Image: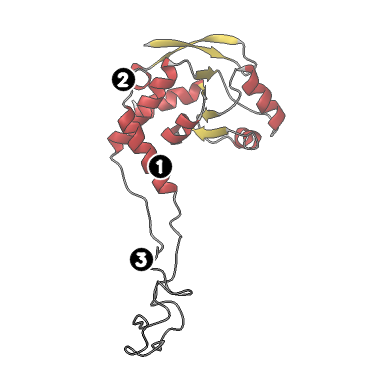
Amino acid sequence: MSTIKVVSMTGAEVGTVELNDAIFGVEPNMSVVHEVVKNHLANCRQGTQSALTRAEVSGGGRKPWRQKGTGRARQGSTRSPQWTHGGIAFAPKPRTYSYVLNKKVKRLALKSVLSSKAKDGEIVVVDKIAMDEIKTKSFKNFLTAVNAEGKSVVVTPEVNDNVVKSARNIPGVVTSPAKLINVYDLLNAKTLVIDKDALAVIEEVFA
């Protein structure tokens, strides 16, 4: 097991903690990570796009001119796709883009990203992440103190309203309870800031 230092919210070192190699020490499988990111983005799509087909556009019931003898191409309706104000050929309709991945695949992808973060030194373990009040400035000072400026994911053991509301106006900062961390947010962040108790939850849930 690898050892990582534990810091306080002021950035002072207060001890060390061991990282479980079953989660933070696996060989990253980037093809699996790619599949999980694609799945996440597909599941985020609304799929509400819609356009009218020729059957749904109003008008066009009468043949614009007779079939033969005019010298023009034969036309059956002014609402065919080639006409202005005509319907759309193969019009997109509301649909769901979501699909399900195997749980083992998602778990391997998460372990791969966590292991990569640990290897690159992009994990900060904090003794306890807590806010007495909702204050963005104080939370930003905390991130600066632990060298987690810029894009970061802050993981707490469970939902903490003061932490969530203090962090939500800081660009690039995402908060998450330990059981709901996802591959996309971790990849998108430069630093992973974990409460020590949340680290234990992650090892218990994903080991």
Could you say whether the residue bearing mark 1 is in a helix, strand or loop? helix
Give, as a three-letter code, the residue at label 2. Answer: Glu
Badge 1: residue crowd in 10 Å (few <14, some 14–19, many ≥20): some
**Who's the residue at 44% across and 77% down the image?**
57
Q: Looking at the rendered structure, which numbered label has been put on residue 27?
A: 2
Residue 161 lies, with reference to residue 74, above or below; the image says above
Residue 2 lies, with reference to residue 193, above or below; the image says above
- The span from disc 2 to disc 1 (Cα, nearest Å) is 22 Å
**Residue at mark 3:** 90
| Sequence-wise first label, 3 or 2 | 2
Could you say whether the residue bearing mark 3 is in a helix, strand or loop? loop
Q: Looking at the rendered structure, which numbered label has been put on residue 108?
A: none
| Image x and y of residue 61, in percent | 40, 87
| Image x and y of residue 139, in percent | 66, 27
Callout 3–callout 2 Cβ contact below 8 Å: no
**Residue at mark 1:** 40
**Who's the residue at 35% across and 25% down the image?**
112
Q: Left or right: 91 with respect to 9?
A: left
Callout 2–callout 1 Cβ contact below 8 Å: no
